Amino acid sequence: MSLNESIVEEAALEWFGELGYAVGHGPQLAPGEHAGGTLTPALSQGERESYREVVLVGRLREAIRRLNPAIPEEAREEALRKVLRVATPSLVQTNRAFHRMLRDGVPVEYPRPDGSIAGDHVRLVDFGDVRANDWLAVNQFTVIEGSSSSPAGRGKGEGASGLHNRRPDIVIFVNGLPLALIELKNAADEDTTIWSAYAQLQTYKAEIPSLLAYNATLVVSDGLQARMGSVTANQEWFKVWREIDTDSQPPSPGLRPPSPSGRGAGGEGTKPKASLELEVLVRGVFERRRFLDLLHHFIVFEEDPDSGALHKIIAGYHQFHAVNAAVEETVRASGMTETGSMLREEAGTYWSGRQRGGKPGDRRAGVVWHTQGSGKSFSMLFFAARVVRHPAMQNPTLVVLTDRNDLDEQLLGQFKRCHDILGQTPVQAESCENLKELLNRASGGVVFTTIHKFMPEKGEKMPELSSRRNIIVIADEAHRSQYGFGGKVNEKTGEMSYGFASNLRDALPNASFIGFTGTPIEKTDANTRAVFGDYISIYDIQRAVADKATVPIYYESRISKLSLNAAELPKLDAEFEEITEGEELTKKEKLKTKWAALEALVGDPKRIALVAADLVAHFEKRLEAMDGKAMIVCMSRRI
């Protein structure tokens, strides 16, 4: 049987029905009057007065009343008016303004009995109770928009009156709000691809922007492939959703991903055998509990600091599942409450779940290994936003830790640009004393600092900064040696110094630690596990390349002669003495021989000039064939 558009549409509606959505058809929601007069008010059931209406006002009004019983009727109606009149000159700005209302509630004021004015927020959605919301999937939902005041359109496309008549394939309503749109194309048509559906979305943005103003997520599919993106996403950023919610065993101590194993047949969480990408996406994203999580915690707006352009970012499946697993593990590690159900992911090169051996209150929340280029900084942001709202954590303080000033600035900038989702503005510790002041608080706060600020006065032990349990230390590139525990004795002075991890534990004795890294932990690395625990999510480069989250890396051998610059050796020796102070002599000599000699050879100015010339020539030749950019990685900062 041919996999045409109507078959895919019917299958998708059936999946939504299985997920607990009511299923409707566009004509049932049409206004009573239509071009030709074929529909009656009885069939429309009063859902829409006009094809211009994209919000099902009756459903939204009822949801506002149901979810906000303590707020006066006048204030509830004011909130409804604000939602319906949210439009701004920019579609993206309107979308951002509405998303803030959706996530945080609509701000209203009303008089109290004593005459004072109360400030409150009217909830549009109940994020805690799936059943408290109204769920509806509708196909062929006609929208007519344009400059004319005529109530009728002129057929598909633009009519003589200047109206645009468009009919998206499937629209998902939650409490009457059109939060998702799915556009389908015929896979059997050799001239049509999934990107034909993407092009159709661009038409909707231009011609019926009122529908897109309320949109949380867009989906395109040809029945075989399926991709999800936002109203600002270009074609590149429409991504596959590859997992639903399956189970696997955690990685082995050798840190290889587990062999495939699942929960078995049956159950909503199991990935359908030989399933289409669209089915995986519908079941993985639109399962009602997961969709509420996505709306609440995994959508963020970021303004480009250079161009000023506003971008809407939606978490990928690897970020969504990893963050949910990380939050549950953090709650467990903090000892703030009993461990609840943990989200686990299917085995393979992508996995998220509970770490092996984790115990309540052990303060080790685990390590998230997501390969470089797959959005690690956004994963950290989504985690921070998710965990600060977790009721068990009681308004925690987050300490975001890096091991370099430039990384600290870079990550801080990311969090500041997206501070809306955090509900607070991050701050940066300027000094050790400032760090102490920032951590001397009863609750709340997102504090950025480098690990080097956790350094006690010379000859003294690191003082305790806070004994609270609801402090979470989020470490970037957690695999690095700077996070070690090791104590060292200075051979010249006899003084003992301790690793930064030890100082951290002394400063924040009851804090929980979670690490994010773009590279895997070495099998022999005991320090990282001692501080953070084991993996809770793995997303390696092979999976990232398959998902087009990052580009493949190809190795091309190039040869440049090495020569030893003897004049640089004394400088290297002096710097090495300082870095390895306190190391055992035999180990120190081995390191010195291996590193200093190699760096001197690699960093020879003549060789660097040769390599630089080759890089420039190679890049310029490549630009003749295709556009792109280049990144240079060096052995050390000196080079």
Image: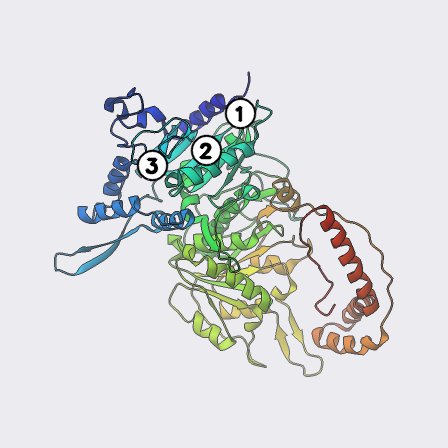
Specify which label sits upstream in the sequence, 3 or 1. 3
Left or right of 504 in this view: 612:
right
Q: Position of residue 476 (x, y in %)?
A: 57, 60
Nearest the camera: 306 or 352?
Answer: 306
- The quadrant in which the C terminus is found is bottom right
- Distance from disc 2 to disc 1, alpha carbons, whole Å, reads 13 Å
Task: Give the residue pinned by disc 2.
Answer: 182
Specify which label sits upstream in the sequence, 2 or 3. 3
Q: Is residue 353 above or below residue 404?
A: above
Left or right of 391 in this view: 608:
right
Kindly tell me whether residue 270 is visible in this rendering. no
Left or right of 632 in this view: 502:
left
Q: Residue furthest bottom?
A: 493
Q: How many marks?
A: 3
Q: Position of residue 477 (x, y in %)?
A: 60, 59
Task: Give the residue pinned by disc 1.
Answer: 186
Q: Is residue 434 above or below residue 211?
A: below
- For residue 54, the mark is 3
Give amino acid for label 3: Val
Quarter of the figure with residue 34: top left
SS at mark 1? loop
